[in-house]
Amino acid sequence: MNLRRKLTAIALIVLCIFTVTVPLVSVATATESEKELFIPPETSEPIGSETYPTVETEPSTTDPAPENPTDRLLVYLSKEDKTVEMSLEDYIVCVVAAEMPYTFHTEALKAQAVAARSYCLNKLGSGSHKDGADVCTDYSHCQSYVSQDELIARYGKTTTESIMTKVKNAVKETAGQIITWDGKPALAVFHSSSYKLTESSKNIWGGNVPYLSSVSTPESDRISTVTLTDSDIATLFASDSAVKVNSGGKKGIYITETDSGRADYICLSGLAVKAKLLRSQFGFKSTYFEFEEIDGGWRFTVHGYGHGVGMSQYGANEMAKNGATYDEILLHYYTGVIIESIAS
Ligand SMILES: [Zn+2]
């Protein structure tokens, strides 16, 4: 089937299913009105498993700073279905061990510890947990978490000792340190890797968080591929998320891009869907991709892993290997923040 006939066939399938009509202007309006409640950071690949966060509203930057939470943090252990009490620092050790490979440079691990601590304090009190817990260990809700016993079960005692030694050291050397914005703990989201530029939070979740803007990032390109069939494409554009747009005469599949070069919308035959739907629906590792037609479908070449907002973990590691300290890494990825110690 040639390209024109193929696109026509897909368009017909889509239009037969699709019933909602939204004017072009609604694309922009929808983007800016996306209010998302909870933005968990994304987990690193080697230990955690990444899922696109179920977000409900834009982050609040107006919550009061928490009073000294370092002595008592109630952690709901999601897998065990029980709540335990531990210090913030002990919790951060388990988060860093889960979120970043211990083989990363010490300065990257220290940056991760400060980011995880900041994120935790930013979200305290904003989410509800069983037993009145402050945080949980479900990576799709709060942050990834792994206990020492789980590490031993996965990697054995020797490797676990290496992990815990490095991670505990990174947490200890940054004990109590967080990044702040306007005097409050910053929403220090992070992701695995980007390609050339990180993404602005505005392009992913809407709202305006000044310190989560797009910046350069030095890691090498990490490529994955996804193949979608014509049926997949038809399903995508038949979803409730599709809106009608004026294609301006453009033929075939095309994308609109954000400032960082990621896909914002993917469009076909007068319909558009947010590119981030490709992540939740088809397992794309990021929304930074190119595509080409192949027999029976489309092949997407995807760059990086994660939403692209905030600190890139692989970028942090690369910066550290090139001599950057953890504070330089944090100040690079979180524009305009201040590194402070929490009150004790
Ligand atoms: Zn939670």
Image (tube, rainbow, N blue to C red):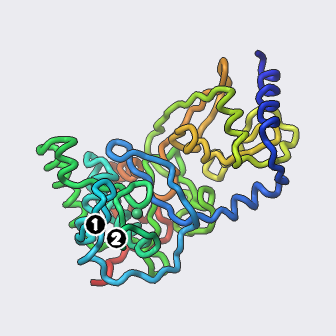
Percent coordinates x, y for residue 325 in the rendering: 32, 60
- The answer to whether the residues at label 1 and label 2 have Cβ atoms under 8 Å apart is yes
**Residue 207, quarter of picture:** bottom right
User: Mark 1 — residue?
Assistant: 83
> As displayed, is residue 99 above or below residue 13?
below
Horizontal side, residue 305 vs residue 146: left or right: right
> As displayed, is residue 294 above or below residue 147?
above
- Residue at 46 percent across and 37 percent down: it is 222
Q: How many marks?
A: 2
Q: Is residue 275 visible?
A: yes
**Neighbours of disc 1 within 10 Å: few (<14), some (14-19), many (20+):** many
Percent coordinates x, y for residue 86 in the rendering: 23, 70
Which quadrant is home to the C terminus? bottom left
**Residue 332, quarter of picture:** bottom left
> As displayed, is residue 338 above or below residue 90?
below
- Residue at 58 percent across and 28 percent down: it is 227
First-in-chain label (1 vs 2): 1
Label 2 element class:
helix
Which quadrant is home to the N terminus? top right
Task: Pick whichever, 205 or 197, lies toward us.
Answer: 205
User: Mark 2 — residue?
Assistant: 131
> As displayed, is residue 13 above or below residue 109?
above
Horizontal side, residue 228 vs residue 269: left or right: left
Percent coordinates x, y for residue 147 in the rendering: 23, 55
Label 1 element class:
strand
Task: Pick whichever, 336 or 127, lies toward us.
Answer: 127
Give the residue type that dot 2 points to: Asp
Q: CA distance from mark 1 to mark 2?
A: 7 Å
Instruction: Return the residue found at the far right.
Output: 249
- Residue at 33 percent across and 42 percent down: it is 46
Give the residue type that dot 1 points to: Thr
